[in-house]
Amino acid sequence: MSSEGQDRRPTMADVARVAGVSAMTVSYTYGQPARVSAGTAERVRRAAEELGYVGPQPVARSLRRGRTGSIGVVLGEHLTYAFDDPQAARFLAGVAQVCAEQATGLTLVPITGAASDSARVAQAAVDGFVVWTTSDDDPVLDAVTATGLPAVVHGGPARSGLPSVGIDDRAAARAIARLAFAGARAPAILSFPLDRARSAQVLSGPDPQAAAFPVTRNRLAGFKEAWEETGGSWSQVQVVVCAVNSARLGAAATAHLLDDDAGPDALAAMSDELALGALHTAHEVGVAVPEALALTGWDDTDAAAPAGLSTLRQDLRDHGARCARIALGQHDTGTPPPWEVVRRRSTRPTALP
Amino acid sequence: MSSEGQDRRPTMADVARVAGVSAMTVSYTYGQPARVSAGTAERVRRAAEELGYVGPQPVARSLRRGRTGSIGVVLGEHLTYAFDDPQAARFLAGVAQVCAEQATGLTLVPITGAASDSARVAQAAVDGFVVWTTSDDDPVLDAVTATGLPAVVHGGPARSGLPSVGIDDRAAARAIARLAFAGARAPAILSFPLDRARSAQVLSGPDPQAAAFPVTRNRLAGFKEAWEETGGSWSQVQVVVCAVNSARLGAAATAHLLDDDAGPDALAAMSDELALGALHTAHEVGVAVPEALALTGWDDTDAAAPAGLSTLRQDLRDHGARCARIALGQHDTGTPPPWEVVRRRSTRPTALP
DNA sequence: GTGCATTTGTGTAACGCTACACAGATAGGA
DNA sequence: TCCTATCTGTGTAGCGTTACACAAATGCAC
């Protein structure tokens, strides 16, 4: 008549007792089935079923093994942006793909911008980290480094000392802007945020170095170089910062630009979403593309080809997959991810280089 | 001259030794700072910094505490669908929001459709589960139930015995279809998959009960009821199954339907994405909406209003947030999530009920 | 029957942390 | 001065698992 805890989750010891074997045998039954004879394994399974034992308690297993079987993804200041931003979603899909293949969990680490973020990173039960594009001075990077776990930053700042995955945004931006700005009089740019506050603003020829995000900085620098190559003056180039990567904001930003009499006649956007929004506005307002407005995007998403959008092709899904492998401690291929300028109807025909 | 493991991650015991206090004091310094005097806490912090100790090892802490501080989200057979499907993304954003607020981790459990999925669920180190819309017979549901952890299913099957979050899809479908099918001669439906294989197909008046996913089943049943209320025959209603929730597939499906001479003059879609694709095709082919084709979506996403799409409004983000709270063991508000028919230009004017 | 490799099962000892009970020091009230 | 209440720090004892070393049983060649 001893009072036994009836509804406590059963442990290996419980199963072992019922099956009449040692705890180690139960452990082997789940962890290394080849180590156990068929008959014994069967008896263990039956005892487990009888008790409602669903398998080794994952936390205890992780502690003993020293691995959690999960990687952490740090998505920047607002976790929910990840799902609003199609670029982030594509990247995540690549991470998720590798995780699914390798039976690895994927933990999204919630970051809020508060000082407690470092603690959250330190307390994430993971074997490695993937950090989605962030600013150079993000304290989260230090927290990730301090854990000593394998980590990788996407489009990452070299400053952090962590490995990074991404293309040469500066060279790529130069290449796509040569196409966008060919024969232009007044180019403009639809940009990602320049600072962590994600403030929306319109600037004239901002210093690319002022951008806190390496990806944004490098692309701006590339755009600037391409325009100055043609003898143009950067200080007169309008840069509209879109707080969120969406067609809606791209459309609104373009409406603003075209509202001016001296509106742009070339527009380079940092994403296809922004560019497609711009295309929509151009149609609506009756501005001919590419004759009156040349337009380029970035990424070559599914919607770009049907829309005839010239763009810079890169495969964010593949970037995500590469990051996941690195975070899992597997070495990268070494070759940088490819990129390519894709010419379509939204830019003026130019002589091929 | 004892050989000490130099690059092993330091533990609380190491910090305690350096700081000249007990391990418990170190533990309290991190877990219950009020329990430790200011001076001692300072000494502990300094020792930790010296050793590169970043805080309690999360796995050991979880084992001892019996909680992981993380919830698991099971996203159905292909994890990567989650990021391709805007509906799933909105739902996830709601889950993520609550997790961020409550400083809780969010673990995506990789499901591949293989038999090993149950093991993956059992091995997820989480305190609760959120299951995204799945079929009634999904073995993952049993695996989730077997863990004994708090769990909730979105749009879920009552069969599983787990609590679920979602609207009354049948009633909602009836309401929106009354609008879509008003005055119609030949209605059609753009549907989500009917089976776990996600096979794309075109059916005439399929039995709603044959759909494996409760959400799809209930919506089909509601559409059927609405059409039969008008005296129409369900068996002649074309149902096009779209394997993935995207405007692209909606457009293709609609092109197929309109290709027929006896094409539909009313179209109810199970998502705004599908409906917007349909709208696009209608414009392209020159079919007047709503005169020649009445059209309804589902969700009332951001793009619905500008497009003038009549739709059934529900807030998937809110559903996600509710699910997260339930998975965290917090009780739900009790009131079911609201829904509402939104009339816009894509349907024919009808007398109000 | 001997010798050796293979198969199968069993204790032991952590993995790193924290709940709990307890003890010494300090303070305050009578 | 004594008694109680509060503050601060310390051992102990696991949380549930698995790596490891070992032992018994089995198989096989000779």
Image (spheres, coloured by chain):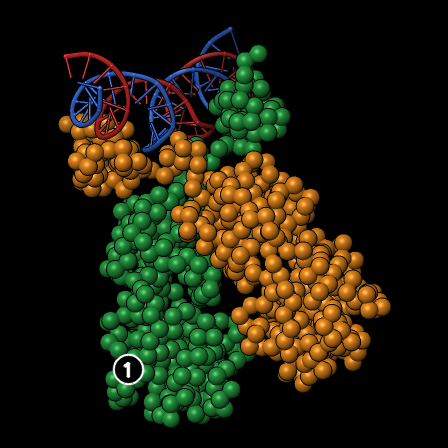
Chain colours: A green, B orange, C blue, D red
Q: Residue at x 78, y 75 (%)?
A: B184
Q: Residue at x 25, y 84 (%)?
A: A235
A194 lies above or below B9: below
Q: Position of residue A256 (x, y in %)?
A: 40, 83
Q: Position of residue A80 (x, y in %)?
A: 44, 59
Residue at which label 1 appears? A204
Residue A137, image quadrant:
bottom left
Q: Position of residue C28 (x, y in %)?
A: 19, 27
Q: Is residue B227 visible?
A: yes
Residue A29 vs residue D3: left or right? Answer: right
> Which amino acid does the dot numbered 1 rest on?
Ser
Residue A147 vs residue B124: left or right? Answer: left
Q: Which quadrant is the N terminus of chain B positioned in? A: top left
Q: Residue at x 55, y 47 (%)?
A: B332
B13 vs A321, nearest the viewer? B13
Q: Subunit of mark 1?
A: A
Q: Position of residue A294 (x, y in %)?
A: 42, 87
Q: Is residue B252 visible?
A: no
B90 vs B76, nearest the viewer? B90
Q: Which quadrant is the C terminus of chain B positioned in? A: bottom right
Task: Mark 1: give few (<14), some (14-19) or many (20+) Cα within 10 Å.
Answer: some
